[in-house]
Image: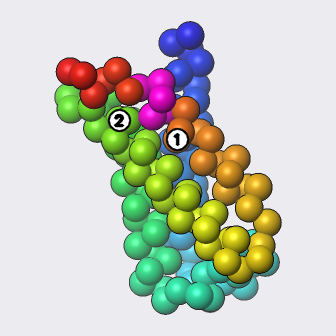
Amino acid sequence: MNYVKWTVQILTVLIFIMAGGMKMGVPYEQLSAEPNMAWTLDFSPMVVKLIGFVELLGALGLVLPAIFKKQQKLIPIAAAGLVLTMIGATALHIMRGEPVMNSLVVMIFPLLVAFFRKDLLKN
């Protein structure tokens, strides 16, 4: 079961590093021109970069405490924060009349990490 937990956690880290890195690294004009990223037109370039930064911080919060064996209770907290981020993304897509399946599928990963690592909150 430990392999499953780590696989889900690492996949979550990779998903949010890619998503956050894209929002932070790709120029706003190029990002907003992508059909799947049309939602960025509702936000300023700074807010899109901030969303990307939050996603990157969440990904780091899933992996750095485990690597350094310190403050491991931050892992389920970071996962819960990423779930909240994805709830916001899902709500945005619903308001825009866009498909929400991608957001819901991505939300499952940090939700599972939060569930799997909830015992770290007891320490």
Residue 106 in the image, given as x and y percentages of width and height: 64, 48
Label 2 crowding class (10 Å Cα cut-off): few <14, some 14-19, many 20+?
A: many
Q: Residue at 79%, 66% (x, y): give it.
A: 99
Q: What element does badge 2 sit on?
A: helix
Q: In which quarter of the image is the N terminus?
A: top right
Give me the residue at 31% from left, 24% from top: 120
Would you name the residue on which mark 2 appears?
75
Name the amino acid type tagged 2.
Answer: Ile
Q: Quarter of the image for the C terminus: give it.
A: top left
Q: In this view of the protein, can residue 108 be seen by the observer? A: yes
Which span is picked out in magenta?
113-117
Question: What residue sits 40% from the left and 61% below the top?
Answer: 54
Tell me where residue 50 sits by quadrant.
bottom left
Asked which secondary structure carries label 1, the reply is helix
| Image x and y of residue 41, in percent | 62, 88
Measured along the vertical axis of the image, is residue 117 above or below residue 100? above
State the separation of the CA atoms marked 1 and 2. Answer: 10 Å
Pointer 1 residue: 110
Q: Is residue 27 magenta?
A: no
In the figure, is residue 38 to the left or right of 4? right
> In the rendered structure, which amino acid carries the disc numbered 1?
Pro
Residue 81, disc: none
Question: Is residue 10 visible to the viewer in this orientation of the structure?
Answer: no
Image check: 7 left or right of 103? left
Q: In which quarter of the image is residue 56?
A: bottom left
* Residue nearer the viewer, 11 or 120: 120
